[in-house]
Image (tube, coloured by chain):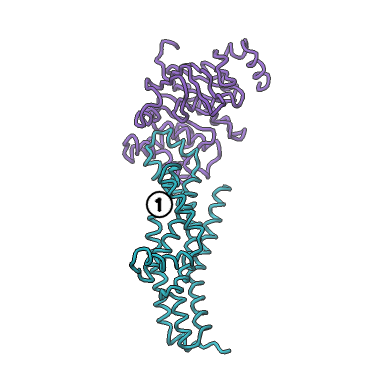
Amino acid sequence: MNFDFNVLTIHYPAVLDGLLVTLRICLFSLLFGVIDAVFLCLGKLSGRGAGYRVSVFVVDFFRTIPEVVLIFWIYSCLPLLFGARLSAEISGILALSLLVAANVAEIMRAGVQSTNPGQLEAAMSLGIPAHTIWLRIVIPPALQRMSPAFVNFLTELIKATSLLSTIGVAEMVYQANVLGNRTFAYVEFLTLVAAIYFALIFPLSLFVRRAEARLVAQKCR
Amino acid sequence: MTDKEVVIDCRNVVKTYGSFTALNDVSTSIHRGEVVCVVGPSGSGKSTLLRTCNGLETIQGGTIEVLGQHMPGTRKELETIRRRAGMVFQSFNLFDHMSIRENLVLAPITTLGLDRSTADQRAQDSLDRVGIGNQIDKYPNQLSGGQQQRVAIARALMMQPEVMLFDEPTSALDPEMVGEVLDVMRDLAAQGMTMAVVTHEMGFAREVGDRILFMADGQILVDQPPDTFFTIPTDERLTTFLSKVL
């Protein structure tokens, strides 16, 4: 078998279009998902009441069902329920936003709850008001502690966008399949796409490794 | 001492955790300028008593007044009292993500409305007072335990408190660092600071304390000045306790 670079040099712009779609979907689902995650996280931290129960249900539900099921369900079932069909890309962003919301809410909760209770007591004993304690004592270290888990999830999200090819979103894997169909150079296009995913995700994995090592080092000092 | 103003007044304080009674009808008061040391076996309620005086624990019975303010009061009132009553913890509880300077100026700037340069100056003065003025730009994890605890004391002093509560301030320290922290506390006492000190350091209690309270099973069993506390033990449990720690 010959690896045909020629076909790549001709058709690579379509793959780059797909990359653009991949990145756009990641960006918007992160944007909407993280906003939702803040509310879900606060709901879970509240510990009781309706807000708490709803948050626990939403987080557990969207963390447990497989991404593919969620994507198909939103794309196919929402139109049956509401009579209006969303575009494939909007459906995909909606599905992944829910995925982001549920997972990032858990990451945020873990970050906040790992706050040293002694530091909270020290801050309270100085008469510092609650909102200042949140802004200055709780959130900055929580962000630092949650960064490895968050970036780790980001790599999962990037990979999950490839599932949207199944509902016809023209992201990278979809483009690779279309170009493969047209040119029969499946191997070439899928290899290119794999290389692009690697280039996107590997630096993030390196970041996670370093950030974790840094946190461990801090604890040991 | 009794003619001086009462700074902390506990009346019939009861604190329970479920079915466990941590404080059982405790009454005592601390007057301005007094140094009161609280000793006793672990689990006797010493730390709990101290923490109730700063509103870190709620109580189920009795009353506590700190600086004339009924505790805990409203959220605002509680915050105000906490600014006037400094607290030092066993585990230092410095804000690890902030430099020593930031640890010190955060509360005065955000609660007392100090401007940055005044707060910086006060931070330098406070650190000089506890003997580590040259460490101001380091981070907590770059300091030894003794230094960290001195920073914690300096942080409490930043608020210019009228009373200081020490919750086993030397118990988490390596033995060679206990002295430097006790020295700082001794200086504070000599400068007339009103202090409540929960401690296992009998030497310190004897030397610096105006009164020593012995607690066991959530009650104050003995309340004596040091000279009689150690020499004429009036309580059998105190005798047992002293025979173990001295």
Chain B visual colour: purple
Q: Residues within 10 Å of mark 1 (few under 14, many from 20)?
A: some
Of A126 and B115, nearer the camera is A126
Quarter of the picture containing the C terminus of chain B is top right
Give the image quarter of residue A127: top left
Give the image quarter of residue B218: top right
Q: Residue at x 33, y 40 (%)?
A: B117
Of B120 and A196, nearer the camera is A196
Quarter of the picture containing the N terminus of chain B is top left
Q: Residue at x 50, y 57 (%)?
A: A149
Question: Picture coordinates of residue B151 (x, y %)?
Answer: 48, 36
* Up/down of A180 relative to A28, above or below: below
* Up/down of B92 relative to B61, above or below: below
Q: Amino acid at mark 1?
A: Val
Question: Picture coordinates of residue B95 (x, y %)?
Answer: 46, 42
Question: Picture coordinates of residue A44 (x, y %)?
Answer: 45, 47
Q: Residue at x 64, y 16 (%)?
A: B237
Chain A visual colour: cyan
> Do we see residue A27 in this rendering?
no
Question: Picture coordinates of residue A47 (x, y %)?
Answer: 45, 42
> Do we see residue A165 in this rendering?
yes
- Circle 1 is placed at which residue position? A38
Q: Please tell me whether mark 1 sits on a helix, a strand or a loop.
A: helix
* Up/down of B98 relative to A32, above or below: above
Of B60 and A49, nearer the camera is A49
